């Protein structure tokens, strides 16, 4: 699965409705697969998508726009050609793995007092 054109994208949002709108937009506008959804903390969620580099970029753009319409967009990040170990963390579906991957950004945003 670690092909040269592969990428992983992460979107962090506040609210289930915003999360659902973002996922819907990403899946409808680009050929990507959702590889993980995680509740980060109270009301905050992250979704990870995987696909070809251009498709992930398009998915993140459309997903970010949709999230902005329905809730709060906290962070968006694309990882082109991720290492096999990184992909393995998402593929095993482990709750701790995705939470750990998102925790540095989540901690700094939560500590900022926004909300």
Image: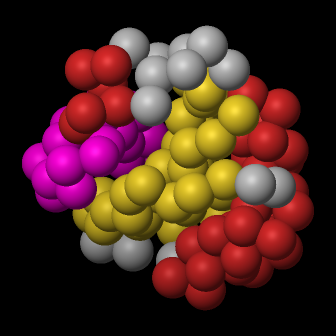
- Residue 41: x, y in percent? 27, 63
- The quarter of the image holding the N terminus is top left
User: Is 4 situated left or right of 53 in this image?
Assistant: left
User: Is 104 situated left or right of 3 in this image?
Assistant: left
Q: Residue at x 87, y 62 (%)?
A: 29
For residue 24, above or below residue 36? below
**In this orientation, which residue lies closer to the viewer: 90 or 44?**
90
Q: Residue at x 31, y 43 (%)?
A: 90
Q: Read off the magenta span.
A: 90-113
- Residue 69 picture quarter: bottom right
Q: Residue at x 51, y 82 (%)?
A: 16
User: Is 54 situated left or right of 56 in this image?
Assistant: right
For residue 62, above or below residue 98? below
- Residue 9: x, y in percent? 59, 39
In the current view of this chain or complex, which residue is farthest to the bottom?
A: 17
State the predominant SS element of the stretch in magenta: helix
**In this orientation, which residue lies closer to the viewer: 23 or 73?**
23
* Colour scheme employed for the rendering of this structure: secondary structure
User: Is 77 situated left or right of 2 in this image?
Assistant: right
Q: Would residue 30 be seen by someone viewing this image from the given angle?
A: yes
For residue 83, above or below residue 38? above
For residue 89, above or below residue 59? above
- Residue 47: x, y in percent? 48, 57
- Residue 70: x, y in percent? 75, 79
**In this orientation, which residue lies closer to the viewer: 68 or 58?**
58
Look at the image and say whether residue 108 sits in the magenta stretch. Answer: yes
Q: Would residue 114 be seen by someone viewing this image from the given angle?
A: no
- Residue 100 picture quarter: top left
Q: Residue at x 61, y 80 (%)?
A: 20
Label tally? 0
- Residue 93 picture quarter: bottom left
């Amino acid at each position: 699965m670690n092909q040269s054109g592969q990428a992983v994208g992460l979107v962090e949002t506040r609210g289930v409705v915003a999360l659902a709108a973002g996922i819907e937009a990403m899946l409808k506008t680009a050929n990507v697969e959702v590889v993980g959804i995680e509740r980060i903390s109270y009301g905050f969620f992250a979704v990870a998508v995987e696909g070809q580099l251009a498709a992930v970029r398009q998915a993140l753009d459309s997903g970010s726009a949709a999230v902005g319409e329905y809730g709060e967009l906290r962070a968006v990040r694309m990882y082109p050609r991720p290492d096999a170990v990184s992909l393995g963390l998402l593929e095993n579906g482990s709750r701790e793995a995705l939470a750990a991957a998102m925790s540095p950004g989540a901690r700094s945003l939560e500590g900022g007092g926004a909300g």
